[in-house]
Image (cartoon, helix red, strand yellow):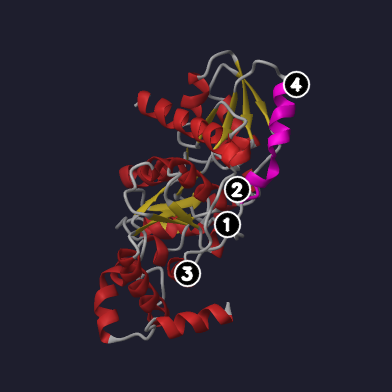
Amino acid sequence: MEEARAVLANAFELKFSKAVEKATRPVFEKVRDRIPEIEWPFYAPLIFQINRLKKEKNAVILAHNYQTPQIYYGVADVVGDSLQLAIEATKVEADTIVQCGVHFMAETSKLLNPTKTVLIPDSRAGCSLASSITADDVRAMRAQYPGVPVVTYVNSSAAVKAETDVCCTSSNALQIVEGVEGDTVIMIPDQYLAQNTAKRTKKKIITWAGACEVHETFTAADIAELRAAYPGARIIAHPECPPEVIDAVDFAGSTSGMIAWVKSERPARVVMVTECSMSDNVAAETEGVSFLRGCNICPHMKRINLENILWSLHTGTEEVTIPEELVEPARASVERMIAMSAAGR
């Protein structure tokens, strides 16, 4: 990283000048309650140079809701949850996509844009959920339950997607499960999303023992402690949390669903039981709502930062590639999800 910083320092003016301050002032005003002003002179030059360079390179930056505010508001062109980013990836006209998220998201963008260059600033940005299952595991489940359709959470590798019938996200899981044929469904790899979906459908759901390390550690006791600590606050959670957590909160939904709920309900105080940066990002655009801490940090998402985004644009690394034999079947499962989601609106 020190070598990369030296290269960037030689290639770009990274001082906090008056011009940089003026250009980035609207971003700072948006996030000033989330980023200390003393830190802004470090972030602002990077934001300035990234925004300049992405125009020069004809690049677009896609950022997940779990990215930090300086990325989310400072350099991202498109923000959203996994479904939103997957759909928006199909509309991209730029030559290059920089995926500010984890590796499976970058793979999904590449699947939907096979002729474009897709970069991820740090290929080590993985996912405990995606790494919990392999293509061989899916084939073994198909052999054990012949004829049963496989619904795979997009938080999975391209190799796993290639073995599935249709993907889903946390925002459309129930819709996809209800939309596939048969009264039994294999739903992988998130056991808690599958269990929470099973409570809302008459179909039998066969699960896999995968989980998100951010959400699996929350417990019903945690929710009780939050209620005791913040009397009257509304508590909302992501369906990757265990069912007992979902039963104990006021609302459960995908990241986009949680955002929509906060903006429509506008509670005086709210606790978002999910990744910490998400509440920071929602707070920056929701006046009159006090956001209280009850979150976990995703170490994989936090591998993406302004420095390696600039490095990625400057050097054209790290490029995401997918083995040719996986592209068509994996893309088909994602495209079926998008089509089924659109049909159900």
* Disc 3 versus disc 1: nearer the observer: 3
Q: What residue type is disc 4 on?
A: Gln
Q: Which residue is mark 4?
A: 144
Magenta stretch?
127-143
The quarter of the picture where residue 52 lies is bottom left
What is the quadrant of residue 155 in the picture? top right
Q: Earlier in the sequence, mark 4 or mark 1?
A: 4
Q: Main secondary structure of the magenta part?
A: helix
Mark 4 / mark 2, whichever is N-terminal? 4
Magenta highlight on residue 136: yes
Residue 229: x and y in percent read 54, 56
Residue beneath label 3, please? 315
199, 13: nearer the viewer: 13
Q: What kind of element bears circle 1? A: loop
Residue of label 1: 296
The correct choice, above or below, for 92 with respect to 204 in the image is below
Q: Quadrant of the C terminus?
A: top left
